[in-house]
Image (cartoon, rainbow, N blue to C red):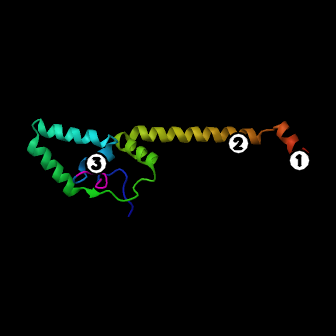
Amino acid sequence: MSARRTKFYLDKQNGKWMGVCAGIADYTGIDVVWVRVGAVLVTLMGAFPWSLIAYFAAAYFADKKPAGLYADRDDEKFWQGVRTNPTRSTRDVRSKFRDIDRRLADIELYYTSRNTRLADEIERLR
């Protein structure tokens, strides 16, 4: 069974303690330093017992990030975008495919239309 790229995983490889903050950073695309700073600030500003309970619950219930989840950095950025805004990601992919289709149609039109200069060059090469 392949790993789902839209699921939250603990990132123990890049984590300091249990990998929860690194997993949140990987899931959202936010730098891990800011996630850690935010977790400490939330804990110190009055959410002390609940933030630690949530941290340990996430560490207990979440799966470890599988090796090779992303092919490269661009793949990782793409899936972070899908997780944060799936509608925009779908729209971007659809737009890219429309652009590719349009460009292929232009190439097809160019090569299937009567291009006398190209036909003359081909005949001259024969």
Label 3 vs label 2, nearer the camera: 3
The residues bearing labels 3 and 2 have C-alpha atoms spaced at a distance of 48 Å
> Toward the viewer: 31 or 86?
31
Q: Label 1: how many residues lie within 10 Å, few (<14), some (14-19) or many (20+)?
A: few
Q: Which residue is mark 3?
A: 22
Label 1 vs label 3, nearer the camera: 3
Secondary structure beneath label 1: helix
Q: Which residue is mark 2?
A: 108
The part of the image, by quadrant, that contains residue 49 is top left
Magenta residue span: 11-16
- Residue 101: give x, y in percent of width and height: 60, 41
Q: Are the residues tagged 1 and 3 within 8 Å (C-beta)? A: no
Which amino acid is tagged 3?
Answer: Ala
> Toward the viewer: 5 or 106?
5
- Residue 16: give x, y in percent of width and height: 24, 51
Question: If you read the primary sequence from the N terminus, does the residue marked by circle 1 or circle 3 appear first?
Answer: 3
**Which label belongs to residue 125?**
1
